[in-house]
Amino acid sequence: MKEEEVNSCQIQEWYPKFKCVSIKTIIHELPESFVQYLLDDGPFVLPQSLFGEDALPRRIHNPEEEDDYQVSEGSGDESEQPPKPPSFEDLELKIKDSIQVLGGVVFPKLNWSAPKDSAWIGTTGTLQCTSFSEISLLLRSSESLVHDLCHAFDSCVDKSSSRPSKFFLALRKWYSSLRPEMEFRCFVRSKLLVAISQREVTCFYPALLEKKDNLQILIHDFFVDNVQESFELDNYTFDVYVTRDGRVKLIDFNPWGAFTLPLMFTWEELEDFERGENTMTFRIVDRQHAVRPGIKTAVPYDYLDTSLGSGWDEVLRKADRELQRQSHYSEAGA
């Protein structure tokens, strides 16, 4: 793999060309100060928000250790004072405007990756965000984004740096009706679609069994019509989502091999597919005991300040409202 291949899969590189067949997205270049904030391994401090009503907790710590953060009157030891929250006013204003344009709810990703491993920390347990503070919380809590920030080119034979010169934040329109079983990863070798895999390999979806043949045709036709001659690489993967009415939406591009997950395949067998010698293979989880272990991570979250005025009380109230809403719909449908 070469740096050129990795660079081509950055969302700010491919989205402008494919936006008519993808999810509506607004992309912002990140200031280096915000990138350094994401890399900071010091105390967990969320940015100062311009909009207090939207702010999430600025500091997260263990309430049992509250005394550790108190400074006795007149001590004058600034090293014991809680760190001041950083401020990114220009970026916050741009993000606020973009969220409004995208319908009020978005999910974030950087050049390559989304902070899926920190979804659990969000109010709804998803990547759904309605404010700059929620986006910052997800990005700062994610360990998987360290790859984008520090190790993007580690697998490249011509590696010249550990990170790109610029980072971007992509805000993508949130659709609450998306079904995880309808997302698929497609593998392209020598500009031919050689394999398709169910994206969510941790669940068995019986409905996919009867849809499989039709889905294969839809995805292959989409590839031929929209991707095959338009994307510059010979070997790569791309993810798609198939809507209820049979439309295919492009979700992402990823390099061939390295850190890209092969899901229902192995890279060894995918690399054995030679031009003209194999027909396309489409794999789904076709029975319950074929479900594969989840490939997910979680960030330890040991420090939580719920004291009055911390800001965390607001996010807890929001979580309670979401739980009540879900309970209401469950009871209504019973």
Image (cartoon, rainbow, N blue to C red):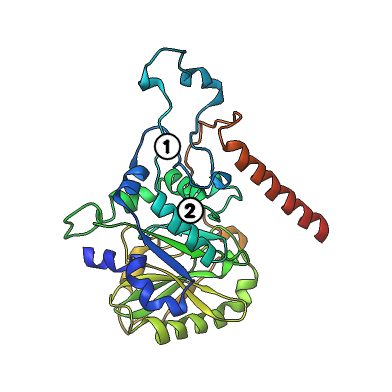
Please identify the quadrant where the N terminus is shown: bottom left
Please tell me the numbered disc located at residue 125. Answer: none
Of residues 328 and 288, the one nearer the viewer is: 328
Question: Residue 103's image quarter?
Answer: bottom right
Question: Residue 79's image quarter?
Answer: top left
- Sequence-wise, the earlier of marks 1 and 2 is 1
Of residues 203 and 125, the one nearer the viewer is: 125
Q: Considering the numbered disc 2 on the image, is that residue within a helix, a strand or a loop?
A: helix
- At 43% from the left and 27% from the top, the residue drawn is 82
**Left of 327 or right of it: where is 20?**
left
Residue 11 lies, in percent from the top left, at 37, 66
What's the distance in space between the residues labelled 1 and 2, CA to CA? 25 Å
Q: Which residue is mark 1?
A: 85
Residue 307 lies, in percent from the top left, at 59, 28
Residue 222 lies, in percent from the top left, at 46, 83
Q: Considering the numbered disc 1 on the image, is that residue within a helix, a strand or a loop?
A: loop
> In the image, is residue 25 above or below residue 114?
below
> In the image, is residue 273 above or below residue 294?
below
> The residue under label 2 is which amino acid type?
Lys
**Left of 99 or right of it: where is 258?**
left
Q: Are marks 1 and 2 in contact (CB under 8 Å)?
A: no
The residue carrying pointer 1 sits among few (fewer than 14), some (14 to 19) or many (20 or more) residues within 10 Å by Cα, namely some
Of residues 276 and 332, the one nearer the viewer is: 332
Q: Which residue is mark 2?
A: 116
> In the image, is residue 190 above or below residue 161?
below
> In the image, is residue 188 above or below residue 257?
below
> The residue under label 1 is which amino acid type?
Pro
Q: Is residue 296 visible?
A: no
Nearer to us: label 1 or label 2 = 1
Question: Residue 192's image quarter?
Answer: bottom left
Please identify the quadrant where the C terminus is shown: bottom right
